[in-house]
Amino acid sequence: MSNMSVNLAGVELKNPVMTASGTFGSGQEYSEFVNLNNLGAVVTKGVANVPWPGNPVPRVAETTGGMLNAIGLQNPGVDAVLSEKLPWLEQHFPDLPIIANVAGFSNEEYAYVSGKISKAPNVKAIELNISCPNVDHGNNGLLIGQVPELAYEAVKAAVTASSLPVYVKLTPSVADITLLAKAAEDAGASGLTMINTLVGMRFNLKTRQPILANGTGGMSGPAVFPVALKLIRQVAQMTNLPIIGMGGVDSADKALEMMIAGAAAIGVGTANFTDPFACPKIIQDLPKRMEVYGIDCLEQLRKEIRTSLSQD
C-alpha cells in the first residue's frame, strides 16, 4: 500500500496535497463539496492585521492556460479570522492542519499577525506572503520579496513573533530566486512555498484598456507549471528546507513531477476554480500513479531526490 504521508518541519500530513492560499477561502466555503478531512492541509486566504477591502473590479481575467487575478488580498482581518473562521474549522474538522497565510505592508504588521494567529490551536504553521509592497522603506514600488535584505527583515520579524514554523512564499518576479531563498533561510524560516504568481496583463480590444481594473494581475494555472518546476529545482539545489511546491498542479502526475523537482508537498490553486473536486481527485489518483512509477513512499522519494541533488 502506498505511503502518502509527509513531514513538513515537524508538521505531519496524511498526504502532500493542500490548497494554495487565496483559492479556497478559509475552507468553509468548499466544505459542502469536499470533505476537508481528506486534505493534507488547508492554507487560509491571506490574513492581515486589519480588514483589507481588496482592489476594484474587475479583478479576474481568463488567459490561455490559466487566469489573472488582482484580488488585492481582500480579507476580514486577523481578529475576525481568529473569532470566526478558525473556530469553525476546529469545531467541524478538529484534526485538519491549518497553515495561516499572513500578509502585511511592514515588519511590524508581519510580526503582529504571525504572533497572534500562531496561538490558534488548529494552526500548525505560518505561510508568510512577502509579495506585498514595502512601506518600511518608503513604499518605492518594490515588493518585500524582491529584495533579499527586506525579505530577511520581514521573515526575521515573523519568526521571532511566531511560536510556529514559518514558511516563506517566494515570488518568481526576481532575477535570482535563490538569493531570496537564502535570505529567508538565514532569517530562520522553517520552509519555503513557491512559486507565487507571475505578473501579467490582458487588454480589452474595444476600449483599448486593461481588462483588470488594477492594470496587472497575478498569472496562475497550467501555463506556469514549467516555470515553477525550474525554480523549485533551482532552490532545492541550494537548501535543505522543505518546499511546498505550487504553480499549475492539476493532476497526480504533475504533483509527482513537482516532488521530483524538489518539493516536499504540493499546493493546488487555480484548479480549484475550474473543478472544486480537484484536490480530492488528485489525492485519490496519487496511490495509483505512485504504483505505476514504482514509488512506495513519498518521504522515501523525497530522500532519494535530496541525495541526487547533493551529488549534482
Image: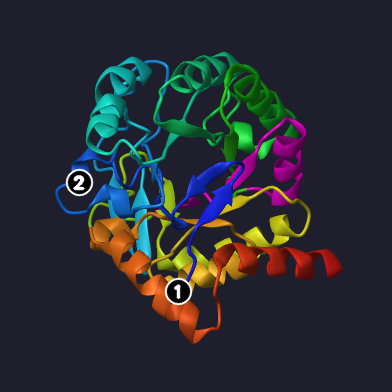
Q: Is residue 259 left or right of residue 218?
A: right
Give the percent coordinates (x, y) of residue 26: 29, 37
Give the percent coordinates (x, y) of residue 227: 57, 64
Residue at 54%, 29% in the rendered image: 133
Res 73 quadrant in image: top left
Q: Secondary structure at mark 2?
A: loop
Q: Is residue 208 visible?
A: no
Observer-nearest of 27 and 150: 27
Q: Amino acid at mark 2?
A: Ser
Q: Is residue 144 visible?
A: yes
Magenta residues? 174-201
Q: Which residue is mark 2?
A: 31
Give the percent coordinates (x, y) of residue 312: 84, 70
- Relative to 246, say whether 192 is above or below: above
- Assess whether residue 246 is covered by the magenta stretch: no
**Dots 2 and 1: beta carbons under 8 Å?**
no
Observer-nearest of 292 and 20: 292
- Assess whether residue 196 is covered by the magenta stretch: yes
Residue at 47%, 28% in the rendered image: 103
- Relative to 88, say whether 173 is above or below: below
| Total numbered circles | 2
- Res. 239 mark: none
Q: Which residue is mark 1?
A: 1
Q: Amino acid at mark 1?
A: Met
Residue at 48%, 67% in the rendered image: 255
Q: Nearer the viewer, mark 2 or mark 1?
A: 1
Residue at the bottom extreme?
A: 292
Crowd around label 2: few <14 · some 14–19 · many ≥20 (10 Å): some
